[in-house]
């Protein structure tokens, strides 16, 4: 099988040059340290993670003869390369605010992924990419489907996160389709998601805790505010959990969730980037 991306979804990198994260309020997510740092903690992993995704897909590119899937791979690589570039600037701005502990973290992520490249089978590396693309695409889908989650966020920060969410949605099936094309095994795909979840989520929470401790915000007030913020949003996180679990179905495909209308809505509201 080739590509299963809907024909009206075009995977093309947009030229972006965000300059927006400098000189903004430290807690750009409606003044909330927890949510601000939670998103930033994920961002710290993006540039190296996305370069790993590119390497793992590129390794199999020569085996793909389906012309549309080859086009999709090109678009996927271009989009992930742009994300890495923009999030590097974003992360540098955060480090520039005094969070120096992030520098060695970035180095460790780079070394860890280089070791994975060197010592693990290529099919497993691609499965890890497919798994992490699932996590990013369901998180992206949640941001696009529930604009209330971005209420009170500094407009420039909204821009980068929503742009990234749109492109993650556009290319959400590319690594999956490559994995399917090369005959990737089901059990490796699901094992990779289990491992990726066990490593990535605690790593994000660990970074988030370091941010909060450094800011002296690891306290009852922060968690009470977070609880208040989430009041009435429980259904969103139930939805997210359900989408996450879908992946473990043998016949799962990322486009089972037909959410391309959110891409169109974003394009209509962002004509200059679309
Ligand atoms: Fe990305
Ligand atoms: Fe991606």
Image: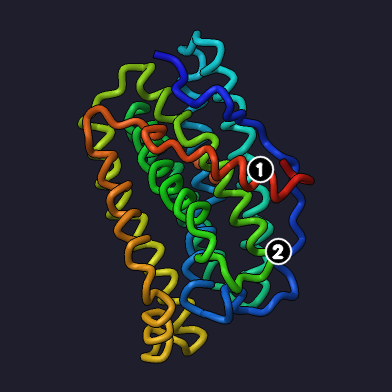
Looking at the picture, how far across and down is residue 239, in whole percent? 33, 54
> Which image quarter holds the N terminus?
top left
For the point 39% across and 36% down, the residue is: 130
> Which image quarter holds the C terminus?
top right
Circle 1 packing at 10 Å, graded few (<14), some (14-19), many (20+), is some
Residue 106's mark? none
| Element under disc 1 | helix
Looking at the picture, how far across and down is residue 269, in whole percent? 70, 50
Residues at marks 1 and 2, CA–CA distance in whole angstroms: 17 Å
What residue does disc 1 label? Answer: 82
Circle 2 packing at 10 Å, graded few (<14), some (14-19), many (20+), is some
| Element under disc 2 | helix
Looking at the picture, how far across and down is residue 272, in whole percent? 79, 46
Residue 45 vertical placement versus 186 (above, below): below
Residue 156's mark? 2
Residue contact between numbered discs 1 and 2, judged by CB atoms under 8 Å: no
């Amino acid at each position: 099988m080739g590509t299963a991306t809907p024909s009206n979804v075009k995977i093309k990198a947009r030229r972006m040059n965000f300059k927006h994260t400098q000189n903004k309020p430290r807690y750009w997510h409606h003044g909330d340290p927890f949510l601000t740092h939670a998103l930033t903690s994920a961002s710290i992993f993006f540039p190296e993670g996305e370069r790993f995704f590119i390497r793992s897909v590129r390794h199999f590119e020569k085996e793909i003869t389906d012309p549309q899937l080859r086009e999709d791979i090109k678009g996927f690589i271009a989009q992930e390369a742009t994300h890495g570039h923009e999030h590097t600037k974003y992360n540098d701005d955060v480090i520039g605010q005094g969070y120096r502990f992030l520098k060695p973290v970035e180095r460790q992520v780079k070394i860890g992924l280089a070791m994975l490249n060197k010592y693990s089978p290529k099919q497993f590396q691609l499965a890890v990419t497919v798994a992490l693309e699932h996590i990013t695409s369901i998180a992206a889908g949640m941001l696009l489907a529930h604009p209330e989650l971005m209420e009170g966020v500094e407009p420039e920060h909204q821009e980068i996160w929503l742009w990234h969410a749109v492109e993650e949605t556009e290319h959400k099936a590319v690594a999956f389709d490559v994995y399917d094309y090369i005959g990737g095994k089901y059990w490796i795909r699901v094992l990779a998601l289990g491992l990726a979840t066990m490593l990535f989520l605690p790593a994000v929470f660990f970074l988030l805790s370091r941010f909060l401790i450094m800011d002296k915000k690891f306290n009852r007030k922060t968690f009470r505010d977070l609880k208040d913020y989430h009041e009435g949003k429980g259904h969103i996180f139930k939805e997210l959990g359900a989408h996450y679990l879908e992946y473990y179905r043998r016949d799962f495909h990322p486009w089972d969730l037909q959410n391309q209308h959110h891409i169109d809505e974003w394009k209509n509201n962002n004509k200059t980037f679309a």
